[in-house]
Amino acid sequence: MSQAEIDLIREKVNLETSQIAWKELQRFFASGTAVYVAPDLDLVEVAYQFSMDNKALVEQWMQNGQLGLVSDQQAIDWLEADVQVWAVVVKPWILVQG
């Protein structure tokens, strides 16, 4: 894959990233497809790596506790605080950063 193609994919992911109320994502949490991305990671980069199926890097982030399914406690806290999260879809996942 050329650098231009990589840049195009990253730009596409960036354009698809937006803020949304956590309450709007409850159905994805309920279905187990809401993935928490730690604030020290770049959400666009994580989405890009997901889209490129970079299992090694994703597993590393998971082992470091920087990435994982949104926990019940996170979901409750975000809902009660009516939090806006950054989100991007990388089917079948919704990556969220709050």
Image (tube, helix red, strand yellow):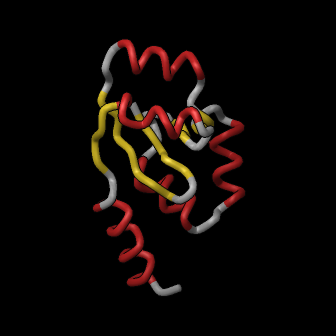
The residue depicted at 33 percent of the width and 59 percent of the height is 16
Q: Is residue 81 above or below residue 65?
A: above
The residue depicted at 48 percent of the width and 62 percent of the height is 48
Q: Is residue 90 left or right of residue 18?
A: right
The residue depicted at 57 percent of the width and 59 percent of the height is 50
Tell me where residue 27 appears, x and y as whole percent: 49, 37
Q: Quadrant of residue 81?
A: top left
Q: Quadrant of residue 33?
A: top right
Quadrant including the C terminus = top left
Tell me where residue 90 appears, x and y as whole percent: 50, 58
Task: Point out the residue furthest to the bottom here.
Answer: 2
Q: Is residue 93 left or right of residue 40?
A: right
Q: Is residue 28 left or right of residue 20?
A: right
Pick whichever, 81 or 62, lies toward us.
81
The residue depicted at 60 percent of the width and 39 percent of the height is 31
Tell me where residue 85 appears, x and y as whole percent: 35, 34
Q: Is residue 28 above or below residue 70?
A: below
Q: Is residue 15 above or below residue 35?
A: below
Tell me where residue 62 appears, x and y as whole percent: 67, 40
Pick whichever, 4 or 67, lies toward us.
67
Q: Is residue 26 above or below residue 73?
A: below
